[in-house]
Image (cartoon, rainbow, N blue to C red):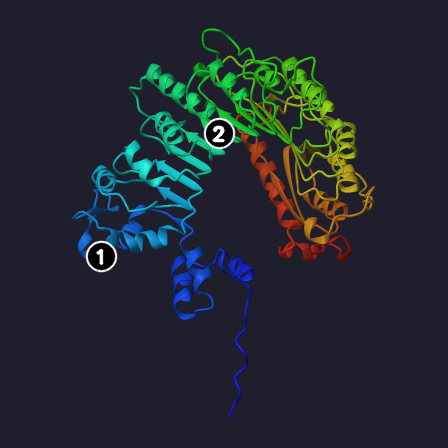
Amino acid sequence: MAVQPPALRIPAEIQDIICHNLTFQRKDLLHLSRVCRHWHAVAEAVAWETVDELETLLRLMPRDAWEGASVYTGVMTVTLKRQPTASDWEPVLTKAGYVKTLCLDFVSQDLQWSIVRDPPPRSLFPALRELSIDDSFEHEMFDIESHFMAVLVPPTLSILRITSTYQDVCSDAASILECCCRESITTVHVNNQDYNEQERDIGFEWYTLGDLMDALQLCPRLSHVSLKLRLDKDPRLFIRLSESPALVSMNIDLGGDDRLQGWLEGGAPKYPPSRFSALRHLHIDGGSFFDAMSIIALPAQKAPCRKMEAIYVHAGHEDESGALQLLVEDINKWCDASTLRKVQIERAEWGEEIQEWPLVYEHIEPLTKFRGLTHVRMGGGMDGTRVTDVNCEAMARAWPELKELSVSVVAVHETGTACTLEALVPFARHCPRVQFLHLPLNAISIPEAVQPTASHPAAPRALDDYLKICVSYGAIADPHAVARFLCKLFPHRDLEVAYTSAYMSSGLTMLEEKQRIDQWSTVEALVDPRANQLKELPLDLRPRW
């Protein structure tokens, strides 16, 4: 008689990793939990970790307790036919106990009040950590009842996300925080930026935003805030947030309306000395470069050592060139060079009376102090650039850990660009981890591509095989010569080359632009490792992978 091998006992930690593989759907995990008792506990828990609608759980009640209904768009909802008993709730509670992330896009008023009147006998979602409410789809507006949220949300919720295109949701967010989870919440995302109601009550929206600000102040563990709104800048909002002692990440997006960029009565905020004491990640969209400067700056009596890790600023549509220079100088002055990794500064293009000025190296040079930078993006609504090959070499030498660099401006072909293909050489030599370069290049002259020699140990193979090069301006005469140069300069890279067409730029006719697009398409095909055109290149110049 054959002897069967012993069952393979995979540790629960490994089972959990396998079950979290994104290729598995819930039905796969539930099937696994049914057919293999050794996998049952882990597979079932992972299957119910994320639930996309409350109705999925309510359908676990006995069939005579509920009925399905369809709203006019075909979205299926659930209606409770009778008062649910404790035994009716039991199968729901068993699965709901696993839920860590709950996503809601619509729950009817009838269902909300049915659950409020006859709630489950114990906490519905005891393990819930993230709640996402998205009122942005084309069916009935999702009116959130605070009593319903009190049943759903446990006092352990960490992350709250609310989005709506139909109504102001600041008051809903405030109500959830105040009544349910203010002691546990760490992350709040409110997105009302696409709120498209024509007859909006701006005064009432500022009142509800005040409710949200009051609620945020009551959250001692609050570390991440993202507010995407369409309101004028109220200094109270920034002052309240500046007083949050645990705030690590702040994302304030006021939208792109030109009329919504000025401060309300009272002017710019007057911050307390301890402002933004824990801030590490700043994302501000709207207003002036000076607004970002006031957040980054530290009081005179404090040491210049703000431990920033990432800075994103999209602003300055009315600012002069000097304001941008002052911003990067303040970053240089107040931010710790040992922690800053990502800087992205874009000039906004709102309004019709935007001042025209180019991006110059003085806008970038203060950032060369930060040798640990991995991502640098400068550009937006700046007319042309004065950055040169020499400047590019200085940047490459300053940022040996660089992964992404973008100098993206409005191309002004009448003045051209001072950068040539020579600008790429220092990045090949000094930045072995670079994966994306967007530069304003003139490719008429082909330099002699020397074999790159990195100034420090090369990155692991898995990190440096792909490189995308985006080119703006892009004057070019010989696509084949450009392709040969790039392949020789980056011999061990899987190259991708793209030309950024200059829509509505001055100094280039439509025919010239089309010719330029065609020529760069040829370069793109020649450096593509899958393209047949590479057969035309000598073996020693073909990319290796």
**Residue 28 location in percent, x, y?**
41, 62
Q: Earlier in the sequence, mark 1 or mark 2?
A: 1
- Camera-nearest residue between 135 and 539: 135
Q: Position of residue 399 (x, y in %)?
A: 75, 34
Residue topped by disc 1: 62
Horizontally, residue 437 falls left or right of residue 186, namely right
Decide which of 189, 261 is in the foreground and name it: 189
What residue appears at the point 47 percent right and 18 percent down from the top-left corner?
237
State the residue at coordinates (83%, 41%): 455
Q: Amino acid at mark 1?
A: Pro
Looking at the picture, tell me which residue is in the foreground, 19 or 479: 19
Q: Residue at x 60, y 18 (%)?
A: 274
Secondary structure of the residue carrying numbered label 2: strand
Tell me if mark 1 has few (under 14), some (14-19) or many (20+) residues whose alpha carbon lies within 10 angstroms of its own.
few
* Label 2: few (<14), some (14–19) or many (≥20) C-alpha neighbours in 10 Å: some
Local secondary structure at mark 1: loop
Asked where in the image residue 131 lies, by quadrant, the reply is top left
The mark closer to the camera, 1 or 2, is 1
Say which quadrant the C terminus sits in: bottom right
Furthest residue toward bottom: 1
Query: In the rendered view, would you say 338 is above or below 523?
Result: above
Picture quadrant where residue 95 is located: bottom left
Asked if residue 142 shows in the view, the reply is no
| Rendered location of residue 159, percent (x, y) | 46, 37
Looking at the picture, which amino acid does disc 2 mark? Ser
- Residue 251 higher or lower than 358, as above or below: below
Mark 1 to mark 2: distance in Å? 41 Å
Point out which mark residue 226 bears. 2
Who's the residue at 76% across and 45% down the image?
489
Q: Which mark is residue 352?
A: none
Q: Position of residue 123 (x, y in %)?
A: 35, 45
215 on left or right of 344:
left
